[in-house]
Each structure stands twice: as C-alpha cells, then as structure tokens.
Amino acid sequence: MEERKKNRKLNIKILKRKRDRYVFTDKKHPDKGIMSFVFGVLSVCTICYSIFLSYKNGGEAKGSYGAAVLLCLIYSLVGLVLGIISRMEKDIFKLFPTAGIVLNSIALLCIGVLLYLAFV
C-alpha cells in the first residue's frame, strides 16, 4: 500500500517535469500582422492627440490636425487590409493581426464619428 503511494508521488513529479519542457512550433508572428498593429497604434495615438490639442485650443482644430487625421485614415485603411490578409495565413500566431484589425477599426470608427460631428 505504501509503495503505491510512493509510486503515485513519483509519477506526479515526473509529469510536472515533462510539463516544463520547451514546446517547439513552426508558428511565427507575421510581418504584415505586426505592421498592421503598428499602423493601428500610430493611428489611434495620433487621433487622440489631435483631439486633445483641439480641446486644449478651445475646440478649434487647426488645419494640421485635420491633415494628421487624414493620414491616420490612410494608415488605418492600409493597416486593416494588412491585418485581414495576415489573419488568413496558416500556421501563425494570431495576436498581432487580430490586435491590428481591432485598433484600425477603432481608428476608422473615431474618424467616422469626428466627420459626423463636424457636419452636424
């Protein structure tokens, strides 16, 4: 009976050791997905900064803020396309493409809301 308990404890320790081993995989982070994420971060940060500067300026946006948001529109569209293309690849980690799609969608949504508020 005691031998069985020792064997169980021994087996549990062996299982824990096997669990800590390295896992080798062929998956990789796609370059297009990383670029999509970078474009998304740049777009969202630039839009937020433009809104902050407009608020700080008393609600009046300068032309340079509008030009920056226009560039963000282009970056967001390109980033969204890159994210979707890289998400369809096989054997990849999907963190960066998914994050890129989400960030670029948020940026496009913010630009749409800004345009809507400008014409209302």
Image: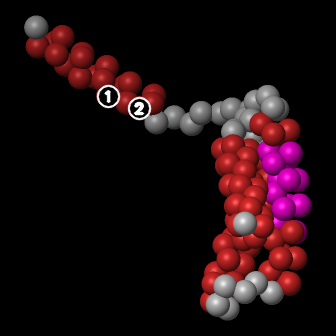
Split into 4 quadrants, where in the image is the C terminus? Answer: bottom right
| Residue type, mark 2 in image | Arg
Please indicate whether residue 4 sits to the left or right of residue 41 in the image. left
Q: Does residue 6 lie above or below 21 as drawn?
A: above
Name the residue furthest bottom: 57
Residue drawn at x 82%, y 66% as measured from the top left: 72
Identify the residue position indicated by label 1 in the image.
13
Q: Main secondary structure of the magenta part?
A: helix
Picture layout, residue 80 above or below residue 24: below
The location of residue 66, given as percent across then percent down, is: 83, 77
Residue count near mark 1 (Cα–Cα under 10 Å), binned few <14, some 14–19, many ≥20: few
Reply yes or no: does residue 24 show up in magenta. no
Where residue 94 sits: x, y (%)?
Answer: 69, 39
* 30 to the left or right of 22: right
Residue 59: quarter of image: bottom right
Foreground: 61 or 41?
61
Q: Which residue is mark 2?
A: 17
Q: Nearer the viewer, residue 60 or 90?
A: 60
The residue positioned 86% from the left and 53% from the top of the image is: 77
* Magenta region: 71-83
Could you say which is closer to the camera, residue 92 or residue 3? 92
